[in-house]
Image: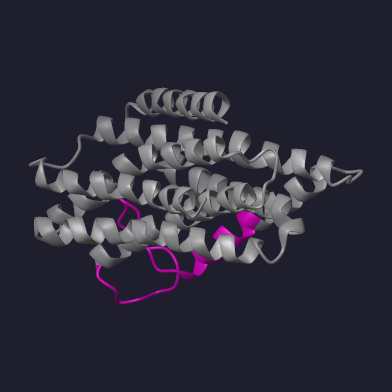
Amino acid sequence: MMMKVAVGLLVPFLGTLLGSAMVFLLRDDLSPRLQKLLLGFASGVMIAASVWSLLIPSIDMAEEQGLSAAWMPAAAGFLAGMAFLLLLDSIIPHLHVNSSEPEGVRTKLKKTTMLVFAVTLHNIPEGMAVGVVLAGMMEGVSNLSPAGAMALSVGIAIQNFPEGAIISLPLKSAGQSRAKAFLNGALSGVVEPVAGIVTILLITHALPVLPYLLAFAAGAMIYVVVEELIPEAQSGRHSNIATIGVALGFVLMMILDVALG
């Protein structure tokens, strides 16, 4: 069981690691069209994962616990997750790719550092999502199977691959060496297994709140999609490419979750 948990935690990070390694293989930045496709794809994966891997299991668990309003944990947890990411977004200094205006508290940090913070910020809910599903699996929750947990980990790893490239290549263009750009891109993904471990430790001491935490992770992920990924993907020309990416990512994650979960 512990081996499955370790693999589940590390697979998403591996996606970021491999994506960041593209800095050694690609000479130039990704084309704007490809960036839009990949950002849309990541959005689709995260939306589908939020619904099939987190919100639906949250409602099912609440029903199994005998709650008369089975929707309540999902609704409360979802809103709390959105509020949590809104708070982090407001206080952590960060800079989105293709943006010149930093967000969060004012700081004198370098542009490259704030680019890494931006990716790190939205990797937190992804790590929480994996952690909460793995914790439910460890506790024997009926609708959180090892196959479903692995489907979520693989889905997030797939969308982490382009994200790793999208952060490491601009870092190289900003003046960092390929090795340093790769390292910073990889470090942005370290927060995922850390957030997953913290989430697992919390849930093992408070299993009844698992439906709330499932929805909390979903809310945090949807915040990232709505606040960052979709606006970046839809800016400028060729926004229809991003829409195609959303469809592909959504369908792929849905298939993974339904087929394996």
Q: From this view, report whether residue 73 is shown above or below residue 188.
A: above
Q: From this view, report whether residue 252 is shown above or below residue 82.
A: above
Residue, x 29% and y 61% (percent of image)? 187
Q: From this view, report whether residue 65 is shown above or below residue 201.
A: above
Q: Position of residue 199 (x, y in %)?
A: 57, 61
Looking at the image, residue 69 sits to the left or right of residue 18; the answer is right
Please check the rendered image and state whether residue 98 is part of the magenta-colored stretch, yes or no.
Answer: yes
Residue, x 65% and y 61% (percent of image)? 203
Q: Position of residue 172 (x, y in %)?
A: 14, 54
* Quarter assignment of residue 69: top right
Looking at the image, residue 215 sits to the left or right of residue 225; the answer is right
Tell me where the magenta segment starts and ends, as one range. 81-110
Nearer to the camera, 137 or 130: 137
Nearer to the camera, 28 or 63: 63
Q: Position of residue 211 (x, y in %)?
A: 72, 50
State whether the magenta stretch is mostly helix, strand or loop: loop
Looking at the image, residue 8 sits to the left or right of residue 17; the answer is right
Please check the rendered image and state whether residue 253 is part of the magenta-colored stretch, yes or no.
Answer: no
